[in-house]
């Protein structure tokens, strides 16, 4: 993992745009060199083809020399770097081919033989153009990061002495109040204090329908306030803002290498020496065995080297990965690394958490059943008290129902959360236990039959039950109902239509889970699992074969997310700083799971297309360059010049195919 918040300026703003993300500007030296190359090569081609100076090649030598060493400098340097790193890359091919052509031509100039300065000059110029195009494409693929950073407003409006004042965004701190007018971008993550409006969050969550916001709602920096004036208390600023975190995730992912990329790199590392050998072999064959002239044989050797520059092979994978990661971010799907993008397309089983993943995670308290001398108010009051430090959705519902506000007026002296089971607290002079039946069993408590009956009755209606025990005695049972997210059923259907197995893994009891499963259309339900048991279940599923994904909310699902082949953490707006898992789904909508899989499948097919095309292009190109068609045509079909043009075109095709992914729409 890279260090946090790199490039964060003075530790305030969303970060700086890096040179490679800035696009074509700032590469003036490259443009000048290309201009120099063209300025020399065009006269060379004219002189050679019109035979302007009779037999004299000296003027061409004069023109070709700066191209060879000035325009060609970076290839020489690249060759030096590549060889000293113990590998051979495409620079080696460019340098070998052009140096051969150039040296032979110098020799020819003074000995009155053939020259092909036009070949070396054209190859170098075209290769420089090709390389420049790759840089342009790189700028194009990091458009995702650039676009994200441009979302960050530079200033925010605060109230000072009752008057609105614009201040630099870097000077805003958490707790400040900012004013956002209609049509403006919200400058910080925050909570609405006053006003109502509908906010367009599509740039962050991928959700195209604007979201209504009122007092108490969270807003995300970078989103657009469409109507109404909002007063927002800043909570996340600078590097802690959702926007910077998304930017950081996308960058880190784009810097990582996918396994398929390593494979392609290895292919390139074998490819270059192979081509050098083929070229040498072809030269010897034509010169020694076929009795051709030195010039002819050398042309063949040089053409092979030029056409085989494995640029297309080298960029086939990374361009697709970069564009895929960027497109994911646009849809609100943050892949944390390139490997995750690759694995996601192969997912065959999706395990889903229930609370907060399939369901809204905003349960409402519906019933309170007392089982002894306690009043229902007492039971609810004690539960609300014991839960007031817990962040669990069930806990929040109980606290709300008990009329308390979270973490305030809480009179419990000790508190312990038992993830996946419940909580234990000392309130006043009583020990209060709130949690599942398994928690009671764990503590050696047995509820009376009347409570067990009440619980099963409530559970069969899809409600989650929670027992309350006081001082070692079960006092009552609470029922909470959590509804399915409106999109969950459709999301499950989409997965099943893609032939992907779905399964619920939950800590909740059997009856409730099965009833939710029925509603969502999932037949296989694993219930009563602790966070560790969820991880073990994922492990079991992996043993059944295939690639297993776990989708969870990241609170108590972290072990399972980590154990899965692909862990998908469901975020909610500003909460994307989720450490567990390989993918963060910004919007809490499960349809993004099938979209992620679709995107990954498309990216992988683009990679395969690109690799197949590069291989085909190279093998056909090399064969033709080696003179395979010579017996038919009685002349060479390819010259180094045509080979260089073909090479640049093949780059174009690979880059263009990758960029198509930008418009992927599931
Ligand atoms: P899920 O797997 O559906 O997300 P959890 O693992 O969070 O559910 O919880 C499993 C069960 O443990 C809940 O259904 C509930 O009975 C109990 N539980 C967990 N946390 C709490 C809590 N803070 N208060 C009461 N009960 C809890
Ligand atoms: Mg959960």
Image (tube, rainbow, N blue to C red):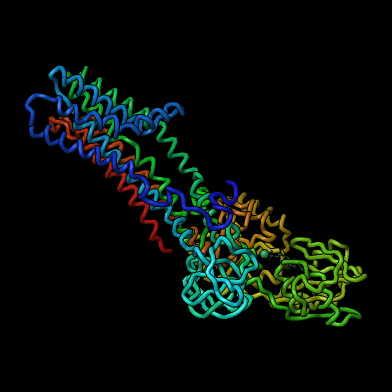
- Split into quadrants, the picture shows ligand 2 in the one at bottom right
Above or below, comparing residue 467 to residue 665 in the picture:
below
> How many marks can you see?
0
- Horizontal arrangement in the rendering, residue 41 relative to residue 339 (left or right): left
Residue 64 position, x and y percent, is 21, 30
What residue is at 60 percent from the left and 54 percent from the top? 581
Above or below, comparing residue 337 to residue 666 in the picture:
above
Going by the picture, which residue comes out furthest to the front? 161
What residue is at 52 percent from the left and 68 percent from the top? 493
- Horizontal arrangement in the rendering, residue 151 relative to residue 281 (left or right): right
What residue is at 50 percent from the left and 69 percent from the top? 223
Which sits in the foreground, 121 or 338?
Answer: 121
Residue 48's image quarter?
A: top left
The answer to whether one can see residue 234 in this image is: yes
Which sits in the foreground, 343 or 22?
Answer: 22
Residue 124's image quarter?
A: top left
The C terminus sits in image quarter = bottom left
Going by the picture, which residue comes out furthest to the right? 429
Above or below, comparing residue 647 to residue 553 in the picture:
above
The answer to whether one can see residue 503 in this image is: no
Which sits in the foreground, 318 or 457?
Answer: 318
- Horizontal arrangement in the rendering, residue 207 relative to residue 232 (left or right): left
What residue is at 43 percent from the left and 29 percent from the top? 87
Residue 245 position, x and y percent, is 56, 57
Residue 14 position, x and y percent, is 53, 57
Residue 138 position, x and y percent, is 39, 48
Above or below, comparing residue 575 to residue 325 in the picture:
below
């Amino acid at each position: 993992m890279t260090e946090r918040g790199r490039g964060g300026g003075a530790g305030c703003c969303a970060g700086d745009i890096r040179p490679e993300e800035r696009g074509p500007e700032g590469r003036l030296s490259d443009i000048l060199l290309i201009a120099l190359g063209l300025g020399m090569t065009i006269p060379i081609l004219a002189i050679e083809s019109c035979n302007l100076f009779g037999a004299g090649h000296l003027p061409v030598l004069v023109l070709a020399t700066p191209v060879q060493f000035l325009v060609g400098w970076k290839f020489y340097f690249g060759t030096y770097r590549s060889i000293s790193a113990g590998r051979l890359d495409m620079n080696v091919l460019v340098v070998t081919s052009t140096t051969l052509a150039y040296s032979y031509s110098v020799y020819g100039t003074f000995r009155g033989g053939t020259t092909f300065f036009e070949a070396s000059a054209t190859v170098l110029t075209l290769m420089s153009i090709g390389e420049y195009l790759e840089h342009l494409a790189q700028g194009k693929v990091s458009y995702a990061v650039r676009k994200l950073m441009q979302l960050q407003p530079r200033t925010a409006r605060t109230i000072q002495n009752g008057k609105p004042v614009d201040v630099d965004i870097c000077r805003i701190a958490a707790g400040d109040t900012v004013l956002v007018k209609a049509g403006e971008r919200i400058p910080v993550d925050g909570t609405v204090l006053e006003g109502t409006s509908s906010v367009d969050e599509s740039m962050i969550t991928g959700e195209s329908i604007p979201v209504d916001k009122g007092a108490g709602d969270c807003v995300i920096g970078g989103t657009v306030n469409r109507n109404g004036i909002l007063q927002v208390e800043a909570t996340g600023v600078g590097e802690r803002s959702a926007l910077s975190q998304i930017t950081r995730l996308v960058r880190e992912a784009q810097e990582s290498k996918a396994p398929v990329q390593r494979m392609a790199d290895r292919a390139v590392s074998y490819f270059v020496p192979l081509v050098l050998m083929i070229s040498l072999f072809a030269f010897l064959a034509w010169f020694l065995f076929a009795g051709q002239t030195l010039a002819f044989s050398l042309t063949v050797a040089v053409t092979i080297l030029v056409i085989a520059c494995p640029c297309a092979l080298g960029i086939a994978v990374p361009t697709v990965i970069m564009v895929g990661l960027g497109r994911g971010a646009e849809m609100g799907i943050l892949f944390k690394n390139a490997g995750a993008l690759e694995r996601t397309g192969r997912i065959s089983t999706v395990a889903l958490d229930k609370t907060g993943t399939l369901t809204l995670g905003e349960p409402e308290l519906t019933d309170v059943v007392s089982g002894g001398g306690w009043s229902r108010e007492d039971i609810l009051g004690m539960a609300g008290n014991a839960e007031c430090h817990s962040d669990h959705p069930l806990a929040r519902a109980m606290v709300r129902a008990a009329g308390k506000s979270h973490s305030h007026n809480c009179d419990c002296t000790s508190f312990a959360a038992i993830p996946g089971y419940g909580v234990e607290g000392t309130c006043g002079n009583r020990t209060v236990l709130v949690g599942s039946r398994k928690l009671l069993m764990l503590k050696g408590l047995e509820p009376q039959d009347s409570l067990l009956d009440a619980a099963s009755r409530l559970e069969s209606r899809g409600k989650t039950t929670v027992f309350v025990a006081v001082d070692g005695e079960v006092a009552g049972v609470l029922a909470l109902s959590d509804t399915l997210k409106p999109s969950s059923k459709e999301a499950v259907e989409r997965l099943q239509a893609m032939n992907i197995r779905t399964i619920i893994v939950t800590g909740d009891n059997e009856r409730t889970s099965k009833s939710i499963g029925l509603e969502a259309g999932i037949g296989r339900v694993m219930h009563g699992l602790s966070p560790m048991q969820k991880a073990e279940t994922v492990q079991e599923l992996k043993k059944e074969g295939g690639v297993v994904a776990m989708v969870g909310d990241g609170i108590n699902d972290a072990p399972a997310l980590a154990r899965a082949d692909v862990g998908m953490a469901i975020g909610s707006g500003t909460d994307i700083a989720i450490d567990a898992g390989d993918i963060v789904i910004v919007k809490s909508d499960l349809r993004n799971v099938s979209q992620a899989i679709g995107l990954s499948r498309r990216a992988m097919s683009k990679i395969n297309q690109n690799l197949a095309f590069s291989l085909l292009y190279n093998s056909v190109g090399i064969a033709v360059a080696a003179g395979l068609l010579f017996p038919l045509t009685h002349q060479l079909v390819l010259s180094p010049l045509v080979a260089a043009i073909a090479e640049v075109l093949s780059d174009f095709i690979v880059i263009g195919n990758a960029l198509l992914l930008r418009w992927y729409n599931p």
